[in-house]
Amino acid sequence: MDTLINKDIDILGGTPVFSGTRVPIRILIEHLEAGDRLDEFLDSYPTVSRCQAIKVLERAKAMLTGNSGEAAA
């Protein structure tokens, strides 16, 4: 079970949210696309921890770059 992201049909119709919150992951991306700093997002959504937000961004980066997070040999 993923403890970082929750996707439950009973929470916002299955929209992926930060676990333990009702804050959709897409809101973080939208804030960053608009030029907001991470701190601005966190101030607006205090139920999301800095650690959660950073881990989601790291996961997205790894998925998009094909990097599993392991150091290159």
Image (tube, grey):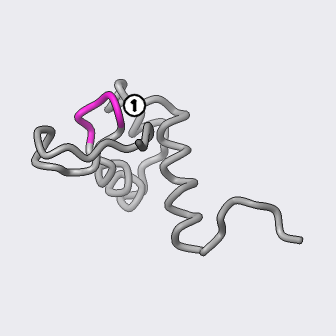
Provide the secondary structure element on which disc 1 rests. loop
Start-end of magenta stretch: 19-23
Image mark count: 1
Q: Which residue is rendered at x = 57% and y = 54% of the image? A: 58
Camera-side residue of 5 and 31: 5
Q: Which residue is rendered at x = 42% and y = 49% of the image? A: 36
Q: Quadrant of the C terminus?
A: bottom right
Q: Is residue 27 left or right of residue 36?
A: left
Residue 40 quadrant: top left
Q: Say which residue label 1 marks.
A: 48
Residue 32 quadrant: bottom left
- Where's residue 9, x and y in %? 13, 46
Camera-side residue of 18 and 35: 18
Q: Which residue is rendered at x = 41% and y = 42% of the image? A: 1
Q: Main secondary structure of the magenta part?
A: loop
Q: Which residue is rendered at x = 49% and y = 61% of the image? A: 60
Q: In the figure, 55 relative to 19: above or below?
A: below
Q: Is residue 25 left or right of residue 63?
A: left
Extreme-right residue of the structure: 73
Q: Is 21 covered by the magenta stretch?
A: yes
- Where's residue 19, x and y in %? 35, 35
Q: Is residue 41 left or right of residue 14?
A: right
Q: In the figure, 69 relative to 37: above or below?
A: below
Extreme-front residue of the structure: 1
- Where's residue 39, x and y in %? 48, 36
Q: Residues within 10 Å of mark 1 (few under 14, many from 20)?
A: many
The type of residue carrying mark 1 is: Val
Q: Is residue 27 left or right of residue 51?
A: left
Q: In the figure, 5 relative to 66: above or below?
A: above
Residue 22 quadrant: top left
- Where's residue 18, x and y in %? 35, 39
Q: Is 72 covered by the magenta stretch?
A: no
